[in-house]
Amino acid sequence: MTHKDLKDFLDDKVALYQKPNFINDDPISIPHEFSLKEDVEISAFLSATIAWGRRAMIMKNARGMMTILDNSPYDFILNASEKEINKSLNFCHRTFQGVDLQTFIYALRNIYQNHNGLEACFYTEKDDMSEGISNFKQTFFSIEHLQRTQKHISDPLKGSASKRLIMFLRWMVRPNNKGVDFGVWKTLNPSQLSCPLDVHTANVARKLGLINRKANDWKTVKELDVHLRSFCKEDPAKYDFALFGLGIYEKF
């Protein structure tokens, strides 16, 4: 395909899959159950954090986290007692265990009390989100924590594709004019976003000639960025819908 043919093909797939009826079996449906900005971003962040494995299990366990947080994440983060927070110790999603969730609760409390919230911690003026994510990780783990918990937040400056955080940022930053993403963060721009690189998007991107690297790492994210920004520099992350949809629904 020519550059134009490929762009037209992917734009058609974006239009097909960027619809609310495709989010019912996706982790993004969890934050759609809330309206307060802070509830949306906290539930989205926690849901994205455990977004690996079977989607049905991800959503089951994400709702389990919301139950632990009394289905009022922001109020719980700010005001829960130590006894209430200790309920999180019974949680488990694969290697993300109760002690990790407990640490996340205290780290989020520190962020909202002392660092002006999640949005401020990701802020960057760079062209992509690598520096913003790396700075966020440093702030997040500025409290006392177990070393084991650090593995649940990746760092693109250390080579990680940071798929779950890139996905979370897409949810927060892209406008909600299609009823899917939220657009509740205004200090960042969709042009700074990248496409989350999971097994589906990476395999489809390789078949379409958008990436050549075999590893799913930050260098590959940047390789994909070049092509997706050539299609739409203002909103390259929208092609996540096309690549993921082709992989998961069409077995492309």
Image (cartoon, grey):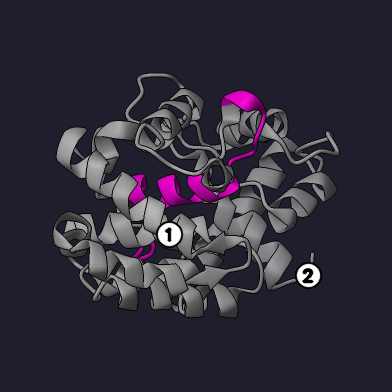
Q: Is residue 128 left or right of residue 227?
A: left
Q: Read off the residue under disc 2.
A: 251
**Amino acid type at image mark 1:** Leu
Report the residue at 38% width, 64% height from top. Answer: 180
Q: Nearer the viewer, residue 188 or 133?
A: 133
Numbered badge on residue 64: none
Q: Examine the rendered structure and indicate whether residue 138 appears above or below residue 40.
A: above
Quarter of the image with the N terminus is top right
Measured from the top left, where is residue 205 in percent x and y? 75, 47
Report the residue at 65% width, 46% height from top. Answer: 197
Q: Is residue 237 left or right of residue 3?
A: left
As for residue 178 lying within the magenta part, the answer is yes
Q: Read off the residue under disc 1.
A: 101
Measured from the top left, where is residue 63 in percent x and y? 40, 77
Give the secondary structure at mark 1: helix
Residues shaded magenta: 157-180
User: How many other residues sit within 10 Å of disc 2, few (<14), some (14-19) or many (≥20)?
Assistant: few
Q: Nearer the viewer, residue 205 or 85?
A: 85
Spot the residue most to the top.
126
Report the residue at 63% width, 52% height from top. Answer: 10
- Could you give the CA–CA distance between mark 2 and mark 1, rounded to whole angstroms? 34 Å
Q: Is residue 51 visible?
A: no
**Amino acid type at image mark 2:** Lys
